[in-house]
Amino acid sequence: MKISIIGGTGYVGLTTAACLAFKGHTVYSVGRNIEKINKINNGIATVYEECLSDILRSAISKGLLFATEDHQKALMNSSIIFICVGTPSKEDGSIDLSQIKTASEQIGESLKKKKDYCVIVVKSTVVPGTTEEFVIPLIEEKSKKEAGVDFGVCMNPEFLREGSAVKDFLYPKEQGIVIGELDKRSGDSLFKIYEDFDAKILRTTLRGAEMIKYARNSYLAKDISFANEIANLCRKLGVDYNEVKIGMEMDSRIGRGRFLNAGIGFGGSCFPKDVKALIAKAKSVGVELGVLERTLLVNEIQPLLMINMLKEFFKPIKGHKIAVLGLAFKKGTDDMRESRSIPIIRALQKEEALIYAFDPQATARSKEIFGDEIYYALTAEEALANAEACLIVTDWPQFSNPKLYNHMKGRIIIDGRRILDPENLSSSFVYRAIGFPE
Ligand code: UDX
């Protein structure tokens, strides 16, 4: 099939484009940034994701993927058109639909001249009702054509995790595939793309698909904040939360692999944004989502617990050298969006600590946020050398090596991701962690 991806140079768009080309489709990656377009056409991925560069280069060499800013040409040649643009948070937590509006109007303009049937697929994360009440009217107005007659419409949420996006797209057995459809003809057209994937495919309504995306991410975020509240209580009651977690997961109704790892909370471009957006949408129809309100509140509290633990040893913290291991919102990525390291660094700056940070991937992006206000070590060892205390903020595997901490001058370790086993540390160290008995 010939497919266009509007927003095809971004994280979800480029991953979708490269993976569909990998499956043998001819794909146009439509973007507005000519530098990114040229990079992609030269086989250079514009986002860091494992395997993405390999499958991109292969697609380009086979002539199956072409990045362009000419949406008209791309859309005229395509039978499926994905919208993969961003929907960032506005001040009040609701989603900003400006990029969706631009994409919908571009599609409408192109459809005016297009004779053959095609299907518009919203893959961007949009709150329930957006596709029917915002996207379709815009396309119909610009194209003077009718949805369900002249063109089809689907909503197909993405369930990609940063660090495993290509794997999650090509092998979605764990997540499944959700197709929201305006009508059977629309759904049948999109189904053809996914029918050979090894995964359960759910076909539902447009707003059903929109809601499934938000409900899933909100559920996972809620699990994390639930775990963190229980962990905070465990710490006060002299219980190791990690033992409790093992005990909980023994119940098959809870099971393993849930998002129950306690720590400094969730970051990333999805959980915080999606939970805020669902709360805002609910409010707009007079519904209070108390569990999700609390989920966000706990997530704001968690990072600052590390500072409180630090204050047990330094009164004041001012002038003391503190090593911060990890800046990215999670291991395997350089993404700093909503990273829990941000409130931690800001709090340390307020206390006028001497901050020595290290992250294997996220230094460049961190400089965009903190500038030169903190020292960026080239290695973990360098950050730790002469440090009086260390805060472990991101769960990079290399930070779980107890020998690493022998480089420290001081002996205080505060583990925000429970990746160290205090049993493996020499008795000279003082270990503190969320969910670990005081
Ligand atoms: C998430 C969802 O997993 C994915 O399905 C969706 O499509 C996009 O959002 P992502 O944000 O890439 O993916 O990362 P994820 O691995 O889910 O972790 C999100 C955050 O939660 C990270 O900051 C991580 O450190 C934190 N987390 C995760 C916990 O604090 N505890 C856990 O048990 C799991």
Image (cartoon, helix red, strand yellow):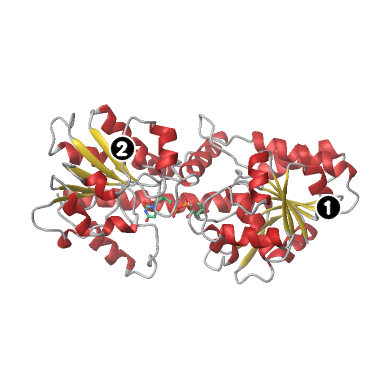
Whether residue 379 is visible here, answered yes or no, is yes
Q: CA–CA distance between discs 1 and 2?
A: 49 Å
Q: In front here: 364 or 412? A: 364
In this rendering, is residue 177 above or below 409?
Answer: below
Indicate the amino acid at tag 2: Ile
Disc 2 packing (10 Å; few <14; some 14–19; many ≥20): many
SS of the residue under disc 1:
loop
Whether residue 7 is visible here, answered yes or no, is no
Badge number at residue 325: none
**Residue at left offset 33%, top offset 47%:** 326
Classify the position of the N terminus by image quarter.
bottom right
Disc 1 packing (10 Å; few <14; some 14–19; many ≥20): some
In this rendering, is residue 118 above or below 36?
Answer: below
Q: In front here: 50 or 153? A: 50
Q: In front here: 21 or 260? A: 21
Residue 114 x, y percent position in the rendering:
88, 47
Residue 341 x, y percent position in the rendering:
35, 41
Residue 254, quarter of picture:
bottom left
* In-image side of 298 versus 170 (left or right): left
- Report which residue position mark 2 lands on: 344
Label total for image: 2
* In-image side of 363 versus 147 (left or right): left
* In-image side of 238 versus 122 (left or right): left
The reply to whether the residue tagged 1 has its Cβ within 8 angstroms of ligand 1 is: no
**Residue at left offset 38%, top offset 41%:** 294
Q: In front here: 80 or 64? A: 64
- Report which residue position mark 1 lands on: 77
Residue 147 x, y percent position in the rendering:
81, 47
SS of the residue under disc 2:
helix
